């Protein structure tokens, strides 16, 4: 199987009235999956979207794939074709 080449750049979209900066902690991928972790900001809720690097067509990840821990958040995108993606 081919290793998935990922993340030319990453960005998170926040579900708030104004956009807040998000600090990415780690990103990566393996086979047909990719993940991103970010530093949480108190009081914000996060929606995570994924798109092929060459496209502007975004797909929101299911709630079950976006998890929040005490100090960070993590999202996993599964079932991706080989290529580069952005979050």
Image (tube, helix red, strand yellow):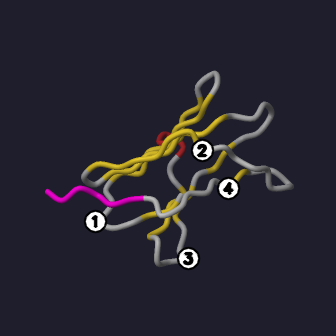
83 on left or right of 16: left
Q: Which marked residue is nearer to the observer: mark 2 or mark 3?
A: 2
Marks 2 and 3, how far apart at CA = 21 Å
| Element under disc 4 | strand
Tell me the chief SS of the magenta region. Answer: loop
Tell me if label 4 and label 3 are in contact, CB under 8 Å: no
70 on left or right of 57: right
Q: Which of the two discs, 4 and 3, labels the residue nearer the N terminus?
A: 4
Residue at screen point 64% across, 25% down: 71
Tell me if label 2 and label 3 are in contact, CB under 8 Å: no
Give the image location of residue 60, x and y in percent: 55, 58
Q: Which of the two discs, 1 and 2, labels the residue nearer the N terminus?
A: 2
Tell me if label 2 and label 4 are in contact, CB under 8 Å: no
Residue at screen point 63% across, 21% down: 70
Query: Image height check: is 55 above or below 21?
Result: below
| Element under disc 2 | strand
User: Which residue position is annotated with label 2?
Assistant: 24
Q: Which of the two discs, 3 and 1, labels the residue nearer the N terminus?
A: 3
User: Which residue position is annotated with label 3?
Assistant: 56
Give the image location of residue 87, x and y in percent: 54, 58
Marks 2 and 4, how far apart at CA = 12 Å
Neighbours of disc 4 within 10 Å: few (<14), some (14-19), many (20+): some
Give the image location of residue 10, x and y in percent: 56, 57
Q: Which of the two discs, 2 and 3, labels the residue nearer the N terminus?
A: 2
| Element under disc 3 | loop
Marks 4 and 3, how far apart at CA = 14 Å
47 on left or right of 77: right
Tell me if label 1 and label 4 are in contact, CB under 8 Å: no
User: Which residue position is annotated with label 4?
Assistant: 13
Q: Does the magenta stretch include residue 65?
A: no
Residues in magenta, as a range:
1-6
């Amino acid at each position: 199987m081919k290793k998935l080449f990922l993340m030319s750049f990453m960005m998170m979209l926040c579900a708030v009235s104004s956009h807040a900066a998000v600090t990415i902690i780690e990103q990566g991928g393996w086979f047909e999956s990719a993940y991103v972790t970010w530093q949480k900001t108190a009081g914000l809720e996060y929606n995570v979207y994924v798109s092929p690097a060459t496209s502007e067509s975004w797909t929101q990840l299911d709630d079950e794939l976006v998890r929040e821990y005490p100090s960070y958040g993590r999202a996993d995108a599964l079932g991706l074709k080989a290529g580069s993606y952005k979050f």
